[in-house]
């Protein structure tokens, strides 16, 4: 019988709810994940340690490893420690940096990885990508996606508000990334994966126009599912393309030139707004601007503590962060004077 549809890799289990951590130990005993209950647990500081203690008391054969940094060295060190023991699976518990380290280490050692997210700051929860610092800059590495994803809303509510807002910016930026992908199709003949676009667009639109916010359980559920769906979009595409365009090139440029100017999702949301302005997509600009304004996310360089000229420098540098990617930034090929002019026009165009 011919195969009439493609097979899609996806997590075996996704659990997004209040109290989800209580179901973690039975999940890890699932023989599809761990045949003998021998699991390693990688935890970051803070809430991850608290969850790990709960799981450790419920499992007989587990080893806890503390993750201090979100860099390549920490990931390779964790992989070396995993090779020194016998484990059926690796559980990453914490924020994005901890999960990225765990995903990379799991890929190096061939272990299935369970992601337990304590915040909703970005779409790395279920993505096949790890963003790790190496030699002073962040780089993205292809990894296997988690075999299971757990998001306990009790712990998410305890995360800093700016981390919950950050996830909004990252999810909403999908719409700009899709537009950039379609631009590459028109200008360069790049193939756009319609299924990946469907997942990424659905994720963004699930939160774009909601009037509730980060204190509401229904909104946090929608946000968690949107970020997970974004990860699936990347898995389908085989790259970050459906969720990363000129918006994320600007994110990485700001990270490199002006570290600690904002967290990932805050930068992604504003990057998407600016990239949409560059494309002349006034309808998307209006929707994104309303979303960012509603949730108190940055919309101008000044909101990030940057001058217009500094942001323009990041726009000029942005193509160097993804040399293989074609977006509106590469299409316009702005020099420093041109970038400064467009940034000033962008800021003036926004209704303060």
Image (tube, rainbow, N blue to C red):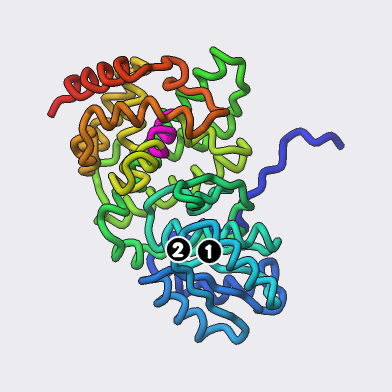
Left or right: residue 63 compared with residue 224: right
Q: Secondary structure at mark 2?
A: loop
Tell me the number on the disc at residue 31.
none
- The question of residue 80 being in magenta is answered with no
Q: Main secondary structure of the magenta part?
A: helix
Q: Secondary structure at mark 1?
A: helix
Q: From where the camera sits, is residue 1 visible?
A: yes
Q: Residue at x 50, y 60 (%)?
A: 99
Farthest residue in the front direction?
135
Q: Residue at x 43, y 45 (%)?
A: 226
Q: Position of residue 70 (x, y in %)?
A: 46, 59
Q: Residue at x 56, y 68 (%)?
A: 91
Report the front residue among 48 and 219: 48
Q: From where the camera sits, is residue 206 visible?
A: no
Question: Reading the chain from its start, which is encountered first: label 1 or label 2?
Answer: 2
Farthest residue in the left direction?
352
Q: Residue at x 28, y 45 (%)?
A: 261
Q: CA distance from mark 1 to mark 2?
A: 6 Å
Crowd tier of the residue under label 2, counting other residues whose Cα lies within 10 Å: few below 14, some 14–19, many 20 or above:
some
Label 1 sits on residue: 74
Q: Name the image quarter holding the N terminus.
A: top right
Q: Name the image quarter holding the C terminus.
A: top left
Label 2 sits on residue: 69
Q: Quadrant of residue 344?
A: top left
In the depicted structure, whether residue 305 falls above or below residue 290: below
Left or right: residue 249 compared with residue 76: left
The residue range painted magenta reads 246-252
In the depicted structure, whether residue 130 falls above or below residue 187: below
The reply to whether dot 1 and dot 2 touch (C-beta < 8 Å) is: yes
Farthest residue in the right direction?
1
């Amino acid at each position: 019988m011919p195969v009439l549809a493609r097979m899609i890799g996806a997590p075996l289990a996704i659990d997004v709810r209040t109290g989800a951590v209580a179901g973690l130990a039975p999940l890890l005993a699932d023989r599809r994940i761990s045949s003998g209950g021998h699991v390693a647990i990688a935890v970051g500081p803070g809430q991850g340690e608290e969850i790990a203690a709960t799981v450790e008391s419920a499992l007989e054969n587990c080893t806890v490893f503390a993750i201090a940094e979100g860099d390549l060295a920490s990931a390779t060190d964790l992989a070396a420690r995993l090779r020194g023991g016998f484990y059926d699976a690796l559980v990453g518990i914490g924020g994005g940096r901890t999960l990225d380290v765990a995903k990379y280490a799991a890929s190096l050692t061939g272990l299935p990885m369970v992601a337990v997210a304590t915040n909703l700051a970005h779409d790395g929860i279920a993505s096949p990508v790890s963003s790790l610092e190496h030699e002073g800059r962040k780089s993205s590495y292809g990894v296997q996606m988690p075999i299971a994803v757990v998001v306990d809303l009790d712990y998410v509510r305890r995360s800093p508000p700016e981390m919950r807002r950050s996830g909004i910016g990252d999810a909403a930026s999908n719409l700009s990334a899709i537009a950039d992908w379609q631009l590459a199709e028109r200008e360069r003949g790049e193939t756009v994966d319609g299924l990946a676009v469907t997942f990424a667009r659905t994720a963004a639109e699930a939160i774009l126009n909601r009037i509730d916010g980060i204190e509401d359980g229904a909104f946090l559920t929608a946000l968690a599912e949107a970020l997970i769906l974004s990860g699936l979009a990347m898995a389908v595409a085989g790259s970050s393309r459906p969720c990363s365009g000129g918006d994320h090139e600007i994110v990485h440029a700001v990270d490199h030139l002006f570290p600690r100017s904002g967290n990932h999702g805050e930068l992604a949301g504003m990057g998407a707004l600016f990239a949409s302005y560059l494309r002349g997509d006034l309808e998307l600009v209006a929707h994104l601007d309303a979303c960012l304004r509603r949730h108190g996310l940055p919309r101008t360089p000044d909101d990030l503590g940057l001058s217009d000229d500094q942001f323009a420098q990041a726009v000029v540098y942005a193509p160097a962060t993804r040399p293989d990617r074609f977006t509106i930034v590469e299409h316009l090929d702005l020099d420093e004077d041109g970038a400064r002019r467009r940034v000033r026009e962008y800021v003036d165009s926004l209704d303060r």
